[in-house]
Amino acid sequence: MTPVGFIGTRMLTAGPLGPGVLDRQPSRSVHDLWIEDKVNLDTASRPQLVEESPVRWRLERRDAMRVPGLVFASERLLPDVHGDRSLEQVANVATLPGIVGASYAMPDVHWGYGFPIGGVAATEVAADGVVSPGGVGFDISCGVRLLAAPFEQRELEPRLAALMDGLAAVIPRGMGGGGVWGDVDAGELELILTGGAVYAVSQGRGEPEDLQRCEDGGQLAGADPGQVSERACRRGSRQVGSLGSGNHFLEVQIVDRVLDEATAAVFGLHAGQVCVMIHCGSRGLGHQVCSDHVRTMREAMPRYGISVPDPQLACAPVESPEGSGYLGALAAAANYARANRQLLTEATRDAFARVTGRRDLRLVYDVSHNLAKIESHTLDSRRVRVCVHRKGATRAFPAGSADLPEDLRAVGQPVLLPGSMGTASYVMVGASPGEAFASTAHGAGRTMSRHEAKRRGHGGGVLRDELAALGIEVRAGSLRDLPEEAPYAYKDVEEVVSVCELAGLSRAVARMRPVGVVKG
Amino acid sequence: MTTTAPERGHAIRAHTADEILEAWGPTREACLEEAVLALVDTVAAVRGVGWSWHREVELAGTDEELLVALLEEVIYHLDASSAVPVRVRVRPRASGVVAHLWLTDLQRVTPRGPAPKGVSYSQLALREESPGRWRCAATIDV
């Protein structure tokens, strides 16, 4: 057996299960990939994991790591060393110039590229800290918003099927072009890139109150459309107001259980209430922004004397032409994402109005989980300006944060944590003092490839019928691909939430139960 | 697979959240063509579907940069014109390659799988393993 790392005093092994080896579902080994012979698989160089508490594990500093790694996970949620290389990615992120604190992994961490998904890293701007497009990912400002309806499940039940048909008809989704706003011209696209949800509302698509419950008021400052390439604009011009595909969704949910009455009341949530959760991002425009700026930074790195262990970690100092160029493009793409979710919100309200006669769905909150932002945090008793990368991680400001609107400041920022399709989602709130630069998980986190998920399932029709038996109406663009998002392909969201609480990242406010799903 | 694989071909490998494409062929250009076919395989069944229009694009750079640029070209057409290649030809040029893509509208094919977002530089490779045996791999965010 080959040692691959330590957990506390216990050694993990790469062979069959033995003493001290975590018992979890085997996943397909990465070791049969041809590409593996190109990358470093020297097991002796793998990071060592030391247990600090049952939900907190430290990757000791070694080699080029500038800070340690810090993994928030229970034993069961720890990445599977046989098939998931996210711990190596946590160690790689720890080598970024200017990184401070630690390279963090959230409870739903899993293998990505460059950064792990569920990774958080902050770089100190004044210390030549870098920004890395790979620390945000392709889907810039991908995020979640939650709408609360003014009625309860019993009022919706007789009309649920009609509502789902109505939503399926008005929510553009799937591959290619097609959005609520059709083909927008260059002038209007520029207004979207600078105005975000604020622009959508100014065009009559939403209420001014919506913006009060959006991160950054629905408009991220500093957008520079000049840093968004023509190709990016062409990819995004016909997708404004669309879900996309993959794990993006729109769900009709019921507040199943309120876990923190006082905070839920501030958020405007009560048991039995009908809600809608929307998960999507910046579509092809954001994806192209990432591709373009990774390329730019790969070329620029030698000029700054930067080398990274993984090319997808390409980066440049925040205060460099390449760094500020990317941040300007990122803000523009983020605004596209916020306008996108705002338009889908209005399409949802329209569908509700037609079927239920009520369109007054109130926005609870809209928050991204793929973003890099310049924030001020206290580190070792000093206030520092840092570029916080959250890739598959959610900002979770605690109570008292000056960046929150007044009505939320007393309780903290709402965090929206979707489960996998057919399972519960959670509304949480940022916990004091704001661990990991005030960040928490972003969802259940995949454990299984899409191919494996399809192989294990019995087809989309069976899955749809199984969900229907649980009272969940599914409207899928492709039944064939539905099993890719089956619950068994994801971690247990209940455990993710539990670890978030035990680790002090965020607190649960309400548990949400799906009754309808619209997917690409 | 390394000793019994046909002269050219492609495969999709499992990755927790993404797709890993692998392709091989007797020349760099054949390998690139197979990489395009692998990517197309993840998004649509195109066998037997005729093409509607043709695009020619010249790409320059290192071998790996050519691989990224060519796959990004396919992803670009999916979003910008809702089109997917049904045929591809890649020919060498002094500074890189010229790629011919014969495209059709997505509505004429059966889409499958999530839409690709971009090509990661992590675990990216295109190289000649032995004389006349080229191989490449790329991770696609979906």
Image: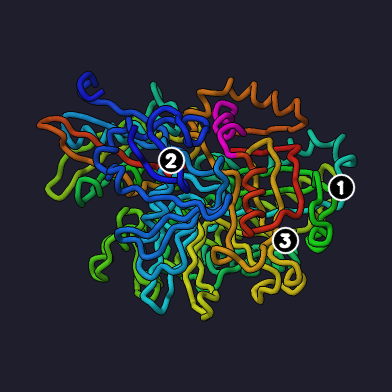
Where is residue B49? Give x, y as percent: 40, 25
Sequence-wise, the earlier of marks 1 and 3 is 3
The one of A201 and B81 positioned closer to us in this rendering: A201
Mark 1, secondary structure of its residue:
loop
Mark 2, secondary structure of its residue:
loop
Residue drawn at point x = 20 percent, y = 21 percent: B3
Within the magenta stretch, is there residue A173?
Answer: no
Q: Amino acid at mark 3?
A: Gly
Taking the image as shown, residue A435 lies to the left or right of residue A128, namely: right
| Label 2 crowd bin: few (<14), some (14–19), many (20+), radius 10 Å | many
Do badges 1 and 2 share one subunit? yes
Please give the chain letter of the residue carrying mark 1. Answer: A
Mark on residue A277? none
Residue drawn at point x = 64 percent, y = 67 percent: A397
Taking the image as shown, residue B138 lies to the left or right of residue A505, namely: left
In the picture, residue A480 is in which quadrant? top right
Q: Are marks 1 and 2 in contact (CB under 8 Å)?
A: no
Sequence-wise, the earlier of marks 2 and 3 is 2
CA–CA distance between discs 1 and 3? Answer: 17 Å
Q: Which residue is mark 2?
A: A84
CA–CA distance between discs 1 and 2? Answer: 48 Å
Mark on residue A206? 3
Q: Are marks 2 and 3 in contact (CB under 8 Å)?
A: no
Number of marks = 3
Residue at the extreme right:
A155
Q: Which residue is mark 1?
A: A357
Mark 3, secondary structure of its residue:
loop
CA–CA distance between discs 2 and 3? Answer: 42 Å
Q: Amino acid at mark 2?
A: Asp
Residue A282 appears in view: no
Stretch in magenta: A479-491
